[in-house]
């Protein structure tokens, strides 16, 4: 990486606070829990990643660097307002913050040809749409599911698909079909507006019927990923980050199917929490784990190298490598516990014990942060 985003680790720390707040609110205010989880945890983690990925995809440093710190400061304030349940003020500030972020990101994009960049730009557009829909919800103009799904399907899923279409082939040393990837992108443009329209109309029978569209999009994406490995000439061990992506992808079709079933059978009040568990804490959060395991140590390593070059003094950071900044064995041991903690959450939420269901899941995340973030920060502070 030629460019290192120093604001990205701060966004990551904010996203972790959002995650913990979302989990703590599960047993008390489920709507606020979903709002913090989607507009806080998901959005801030992806913003953290995009501040690193976009400049490197363009081969050009981020323009107007100070703006990224202003976006971060506004994000902190909006999250604090969400925590205090001042959601109208939070959503107003959030809309402003998202607007500044999207403008900042798009100002740095010059080459729109790579498929990954296309997905990132499309996702950014839905972040903007979703943030204003959240404000519209607070003003009583639209439903919360419309705002939430604009972020989860529009922003999050498009960014995840775009990044994984680049990272999984790169990490696994396999060749991606660019032709099919571009078709997937055009499918992403076409399927989501009619599906979101069904939430705007609050017609859950229509939601159930049109859920075939995101399901078809996901199936196409899964087939494209499967095709990377179906005809491998030389078996190679699957990288650990990709294993996390695969675990996350195993949650995705079940979460969408759950949403379709609860819409068709008018069971939203009973199954919505489980639907959110599978997609928010299962698919999305596990994907984020894989992405952070790959990206975050490299960002910290880049910061270590930059600091050493500026001081030009022999410090312990000079001998640090990327592998020194992360406990890979710990992350590997944690993988099955991620799945178990999500299953445990789903089971207890099904029994109506939301105030207990998140505890094992929270413990898993504490260990993940220790393995991936704390060790690297310690070396950074000691040597940088």
Image (cartoon, rainbow, N blue to C red):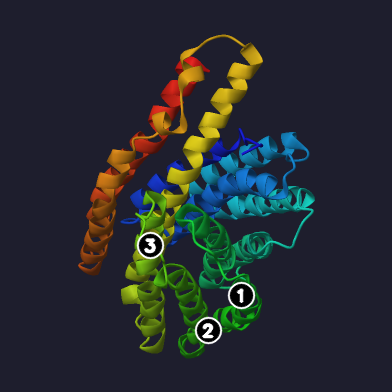
* Circle 2 Cα neighbour tier, 10 Å, few/some/many (<14 / 14–19 / ≥20): some
For the point 29% across and 46% down, which residue is it? 332
Residue 268 in sight here: no
Residue of label 3: 246
Mark 1 vs mark 3: which is more N-terminal? 1
For the point 59% across and 68% down, which residue is it? 154
* Circle 1 Cα neighbour tier, 10 Å, few/some/many (<14 / 14–19 / ≥20): many
Q: Residue furthest front?
A: 233
Rendered position, 122 above or below 328: below
Rendered position, 232 above or below 1: below
The mark lying in front, picked from 1 and 3, is: 3
For the point 66% across and 77% down, which residue is it? 186
Q: Residue furthest top?
A: 313
Residue 92 point in image, percent of width and height: 65, 53
Residue 263 point in image, percent of width and height: 41, 84
Mark 2 vs mark 3: which is more N-terminal? 2
Tell me if 161 is positioned left or right of 379 in this view: right
Mark 1 vs mark 2: which is more N-terminal? 1
Q: Secondary structure at mark 3?
A: helix
Are the residues flagged by discs 1 and 3 in contact, CB closer than 8 Å?
Answer: no
* Circle 3 Cα neighbour tier, 10 Å, few/some/many (<14 / 14–19 / ≥20): some
Are the residues flagged by discs 1 and 2 in contact, CB closer than 8 Å?
Answer: no
Residue of label 1: 188
Residue of label 2: 213
Q: Secondary structure at mark 1?
A: helix
């Amino acid at each position: 990486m030629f460019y290192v985003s120093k604001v990205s680790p701060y966004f990551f720390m904010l996203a972790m606070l959002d995650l913990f707040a979302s989990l703590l609110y599960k047993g008390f205010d489920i709507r606020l829990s979903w709002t913090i989880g989607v507009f806080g945890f998901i959005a801030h983690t992806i913003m953290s990643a995009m501040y690193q990925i976009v400049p490197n995809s363009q081969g050009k440093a981020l323009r107007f660097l100070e703006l990224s710190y202003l976006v971060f400061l506004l994000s902190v304030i909006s999250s604090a307002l969400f925590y205090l349940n001042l959601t109208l003020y939070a959503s107003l500030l959030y809309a402003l913050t998202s607007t500044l972020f999207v403008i900042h990101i798009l100002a740095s994009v010059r080459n729109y040809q790579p498929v990954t960049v296309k997905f990132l730009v499309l996702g950014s557009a839905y972040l903007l749409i979703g943030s204003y829909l959240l404000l519209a919800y607070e003003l009583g103009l639209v439903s919360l599911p419309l705002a939430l799904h604009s972020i989860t399907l529009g922003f999050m899923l498009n960014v995840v698909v775009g990044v994984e279409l680049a990272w999984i082939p790169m990490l696994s040393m396999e060749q991606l079909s660019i032709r099919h990837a571009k078709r997937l992108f055009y499918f992403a443009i076409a399927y989501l507006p009619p599906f979101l329209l069904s939430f705007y109309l609050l017609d859950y029978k229509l939601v159930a019927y049109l859920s075939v569209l995101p399901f078809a999009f996901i199936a196409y994406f899964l087939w494209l990923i499967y095709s990377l490995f179906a005809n491998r000439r030389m078996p190679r061990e699957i990288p650990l980050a990709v294993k996390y992506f695969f675990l996350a992808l195993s949650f995705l079709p079940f979460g969408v199917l759950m949403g379709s079933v609860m819409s068709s059978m008018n069971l939203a009040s009973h199954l919505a929490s489980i639907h959110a568990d599978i997609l928010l804490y299962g698919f999305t959060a596990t994907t984020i784990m894989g992405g952070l395991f790959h990206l975050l140590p490299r960002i910290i390593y880049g910061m270590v190298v930059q600091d050493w070059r500026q001081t030009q003094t022999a410090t312990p950071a000079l001998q640090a490598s990327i592998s020194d900044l992360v406990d890979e064995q710990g992350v590997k041991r944690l993988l099955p516990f991620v799945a178990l903690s999500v299953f445990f959450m789903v089971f207890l939420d099904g029994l109506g014990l939301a105030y207990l269901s998140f505890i094992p899941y929270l413990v898993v995340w504490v260990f993940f942060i220790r393995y991936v973030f704390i060790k690297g920060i310690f070396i950074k502070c000691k040597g940088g």
